[in-house]
Amino acid sequence: MKKIMNDPSQIVTEMVQGLVRSYPDQLKQIPGTEAVIKIADLKQRPQVGIVSGGGSGHEPTHAGFVGDGMLTAAVCGQVFTSPTPDQIYEAIQAADAGRGVFLIIKNYSGDVMNFEMAKDMAAMDNIDVRSIVVDDDIAVENSTYTQGRRGVAGTIFVHKILGAYARQGADIEAIEALAQQVTPNIKTIGVALSGATVPEVGQPGFELAPDEIEYGVGIHGEPGYRREKLQDSRHLAVELVNKLKKAHHMTAGEHFAVIVNGLGATPLMEQYVFMNDVLDLLAAENVEVDFTKVGNYMTSLDMAGVSLTIMKLIEPGWLAKLEEPVTTIAW
Amino acid sequence: MLTVENTLKWLELFNAKIQAEKDYLSELDTPIGDGDHGNNMSRGLLAVHEALTTQSATDVPSILKTTAMMLISKVGGASGPLYGTAFLEMAKLSSTTLEVAPLLAAGLAGIQKRGHAQVGEKTLIDVWTPVIQAVEADMLDGATIETAVMATKDMQATKGRASYVGERSIGHIDPGAASSGYLFTTMLMAGVVS
Ligand SMILES: Nc1ncnc2c1ncn2[C@@H]1O[C@H](COP(=O)(O)OP(=O)(O)OP(=O)(O)O)[C@@H](O)[C@H]1O
Ligand SMILES: [Mg+2]
């Protein structure tokens, strides 16, 4: 393992410090926690607080999306481990400007339970806290035999759209209804070229042969649905687009937003090549791609590979919300 | 029946056992989870140990509550809220009764409220449930606990991180079941049930 670090057990603490010291005009640390909050004075223009968080190792998620028009605060857990309820609770309190706080949770058993406990704690303070659980990863069957679909890169679409409506002044009921409407329209699937190495572990979570890839791997290295020999980008795009096409029951004339997300160790050059192939395939389906983004948004440490997120834009207003400028580090 | 002395002894023995078996618990979590269960529990029990040795608690409810708060704030993952909720529910009920069976049953109800898992889903519930039945029948022994832990080996996980490996979870002991096994063997050693 080669990593730029000091004591691996302090890596999250040091990362958060480095982050807030790099962007002192945008972010500050909530005292006594590893959560960050935007600098803007919350009381001046009170809005519904939007809070997200989860294990670390997915940077720039989630702290990179804190800022005007997106998240109010983000809680950073240990690497690939859910943050604890006391930290989430502090973030809720700090993000509350009197209009309630909305939590965006990725669907992992640890995250769901810790956020729910924090919600219970905040309810005792009479803060109106509501939440959505994002489960965009279609690699996992949504059956009674699993925890259900995982939350992955599509979560940032939820951050963006809810953040935009919250800034505009939407109340918590409206934000909640919107979250329930937006989330089922977001679907993601990934392909890994190599595993990720957790600093405290020192070994990759899984190994792939030099010429092998795995479809459907999760952002913590959860096993995917198929391994095969690496082929060209076009071939990978066909596999992922086909899965998403089916999941969306895609039909000609529909409108979509697309993210190609790097998992950490894949160069942008390859991500653009992949997006080029994806857009060819979508053009062949005669659907409209109104919004695109390419880059590392929800990584898995040093995993190589990409995920593809496709969101169906069923409401015309959503596109404008995706396009609104924000002051975050990473959007 | 829980007393201040045997509750403190129980938690101290549990801490020692978790520290001793930390690597084993993480090993159990590797093929079917993310390999962190031993580290998570070790971090939490160390905090419990520190809190209980520095504050001199004089009643059972406050010992159980301190334990719950330390587990909730230090463990993280899935097991933090589950064990934390269990101890919090026990703490609440312990101001009314100090009988072991109803206390453990309240803890289990908390685990199920939090995690929505049932018996047979390869989680720590598969140890808590038969243990509570045995305590109620006044028949709890080491063999009952051991059998319950080992029985999770043949189950397929449908809750938690292990559910993602599906059928491949069969053949491995559930790490949370193993740590709960230690919770109950140390409970016997501390003389809490007799
Ligand atoms: N829904 C649930 N109900 C009851 N027990 C559960 C549930 N989910 C997980 N568990 C228990 O938790 C144990 C795993 O705990 P661990 O400390 O490894 O957390 P984790 O699953 O890795 O959390 P995270 O996903 O946040 O990393 C499992 O072995 C199982 O016994
Ligand atoms: Mg684990």
Image (spheres, coloured by chain):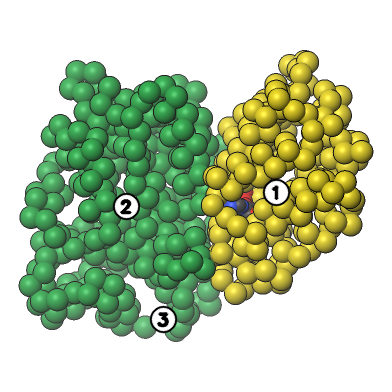
A137 left or right, relative to A318: right
Report if residue B165 is visible in the image: yes
C-alpha gap between disc 3 and disc 1: 36 Å
What amino acid does circle 2 point to? Thr
In the picture, which chain is green?
A: A
For mark 1, name the chain.
B
In the picture, which chain is yellow?
A: B
C-alpha gap between disc 2 and disc 3: 28 Å
Residue under pointer 1: B38
What amino acid does circle 1 point to? Gly
Same chain for mark 3 and mark 1? The answer is no
Q: Residue A182, located in which quarter of the rendered image?
A: bottom left
- The circle on residue B180 is none
Residue under pointer 2: A155
Residue A136 location (% of width, % of height): 34, 60
A247 left or right, relative to A283: right
Q: Is residue B43 above or below residue B119?
A: above
Same chain for mark 2 and mark 3? The answer is yes
Q: Say which of B103 and A253 sits in front.
A: B103
Residue under pointer 3: A230
Residue drawn where x is 24% and y is 64% of the image: A310
Q: Say which of B128 and A3 sits in front.
A: B128
Residue A190 location (% of width, % of height): 37, 68
